Amino acid sequence: MRTLRMNDATLQIGATLAMLAWSLLARTTLASVAGVCIALWFPASVRIYAAVLRWLPVASGVRTHVEDAPAEQQNELVASCLLTAACAITLLIYTPPAVALADAVALNLASLLVQFDRRNGWLPNALLMPLLLCGLLAGAAMGHASSAIAGAFTAWVLGGVGLFGLSIQRRGNFMSATDVLLLCACGAWTGLGGLWAFLLFAGGGLWGVCALRRTTHQPMVQTVPLYGARPVWRYATALPCALGLLLVFLLQNSPDLPYWVRFMLGGV
């Protein structure tokens, strides 16, 4: 008897069909259409992100030639794309489709940044700037442009101050412009109201990453091996920021939370 083996292709097909089935049962037509878009985007995102991860480091001078990703990294990419799609589908349950799709854009860009941070210790500006621009445009389209601008500015200031304090504490230069830009972009997405919760979640995530690295005896900093340049040392911030964004998006409009909690998270 032939045994069915679970591989990446089987997982992608099964997850896509499950999301399509959920979309057909959505409460509204708009939510159904948005769910179909997310379901179809999931398998496409795996291939698009794999191509970006393969070629962008070479185009930006981080690597001198294209390198094939190990099977472990490919599995992590599929899992990351699946988690992002699942969270976007979850947002559609109690969030307007336009807001859920906008949040899905932020989660996808943040997820891709996590992959670059993990593989290369590098946050490309080619992704950071679209994340910031899309956050400001989403804020303007949804009627809270001032909150998005204030959130981006406040996150930029507080991020710079925090990294400066970290540099003093660790006796090194951790004033990374890309990390500050990442915080600025996340502040644009959360707005001023949700920024404080985001900073709390991201700070807790960063503490957890550092604690895990201490227990596994791995270095707490990463090096960015830019071709022809000296290494740059920095803390890995993409994963804590992505987790912070995800928690704010999931909680700020949750109907199960009291109104005052959603208000503190920047929701309505």
Image: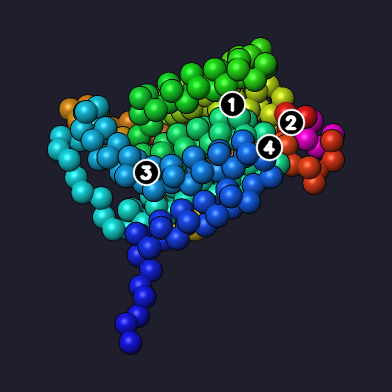
Which image quadrant is residue 13 in?
bottom left
* Residue 121 rendering spot, x and y as whole percentages: 35, 39
Q: Earlier in the sequence, mark 3 or mark 4?
A: 3
Q: How many marks?
A: 4
Residue of label 3: 44
Q: Secondary structure at mark 2?
A: loop
The answer for how far apart the CA atoms under marks 3 and 1 are is: 24 Å
Q: Which mark is residue 189?
A: 1
Asked whether 96 or 236 is in front, the reply is 96
Q: Secondary structure at mark 3?
A: helix
Pointer 4 local density, CA inside 10 Å: few below 14, some 14–19, many at least 20: many
Q: Earlier in the sequence, mark 4 or mark 1?
A: 4
Residue of label 4: 95
Q: Earlier in the sequence, mark 1 or mark 2?
A: 1
**Amino acid marked by disc 1:** Trp
Q: Which mark is residue 267?
A: 2
Q: Give, as a single range, the part of the protein colored magenta.
A: 260-264
